[in-house]
Image: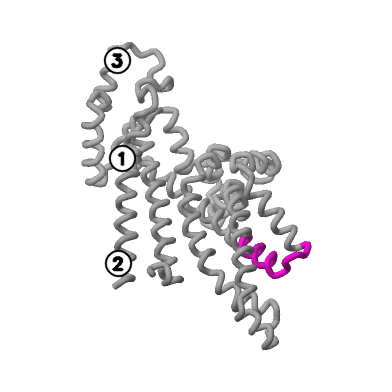
Amino acid sequence: MRGIDYVVKRTVFALMTVLVAITLNFVIFRAAPGDATSSLAKCRNCTPEFREALREELGLDKPKLEQYWIYLKDLAHGDLGDSFVTRQPVWQELKQPILNTLPMVGLGYLISIVLGVLVGVVAAWRRGTFLDWGGVSTALFFYSMPQQWLGLMLLILLGGVLPASGVSDPFIDFLDPSWWEVVIDRLEHMILPAATLGLVLYGQYALIVRSSMIEALGEDYIMTARAKGLSSWGIVRKHALRTSLLPIATLVALTFGYIIGGDILVEAVFSYPGIGLATYEAVFDRDYPMLQGAFLLLTLSVILANLVADLLYFKLDPRVTG
């Protein structure tokens, strides 16, 4: 029962966090000065009467509490509202950007996990050698680097070799491409933004994996394995890495939520039409429904990732329930 109690408590806590996030999601954008009618792109030379009519049409003339209640009722019915700019349902506006973002983030995630685990394991295995020094140095270098700056550097260095913007070649449809050519084109367009995300997270993974591996290699059972004549690499692969699974697995779950929400500046740098760029553009238009919908989805991804991390702790290390 203690295990069930733990799962129920963590789930209830996650649901409470969602409610708080929904409330903050509503308040934070309305706390900023101005509203959608003050956007220069929408209403540059509008008369006061037209602004007031527009505010009434968008529902911005109602008291904030009434707006909040309407927002909650719409969410309960799965309605994220309509965009102030396009007048289309927010979900329809966000669906394609989400489908663009997920494979790019997935590729960056794969890069960070493979590089981070590999470098971290090798650095711990060859502790005190040049491999260790080089692995730690590069990990610290990328870990301390701002995403947008790294993106700009990759854009400058590789912009002429790989596509530097967009999600696909705008002329590819005229070439009657095969499905394989379409896949290659999409991959080429997502390499630079995915590499930016992956390299920054790689540093964090490598440092955590190295620390966890060094701790595992100092355990008594490792000494026993060495006394039995097992090879050094065999001990690392079959014993130490398995023991280090807990912090690695939970870090992967936690950073998944972060990487979904943390790609806004990267997509802005590469003009990659994902949910990050859609959010970035909605900020300038004061498009409250779009911002609320985008931030709600990003927040839910972080909360869900944290819940998965909590459940992984319970699964891999039952001592957390005691």
Packing grade of label 3 (10 A; few <14, some 14-19, many >=20) is few
Q: Main secondary structure of the magenta part?
A: helix
Query: 30 left or right of 247?
Result: left
Name the image quarter holding residue 240. Answer: bottom right
Packing grade of label 2 (10 A; few <14, some 14-19, many >=20) is few
Q: Residue at x 77, y 65 (%)?
A: 129
Q: Amino acid at mark 3?
A: Phe
Give the structural element (helix, strand or loop) at label 2: helix
Q: Which residues are magenta?
A: 114-130
Of discs 1 and 3, which sits in the foreground?
1
Asked if 210 appears above or below 38 in the picture, the reply is below
Outermost residue to the right: 130
Q: Residue at x 39, y 42 (%)?
A: 295
Q: Quarter holding the C terminus?
A: bottom left
Give the structural element (helix, strand or loop) at label 3: helix
Q: Amino acid at mark 1?
A: Thr
- Alpha carbon separation for disc pair 1 and 3: 30 Å
Q: Residue at x 53, y 69 (%)?
A: 245
The disc, 2 or 3, on the residue closer to the chain's N-terminal end is 2
- Which is more toward the observer, 223 or 164? 223
Q: Position of residue 19 (x, y in %)?
A: 30, 46
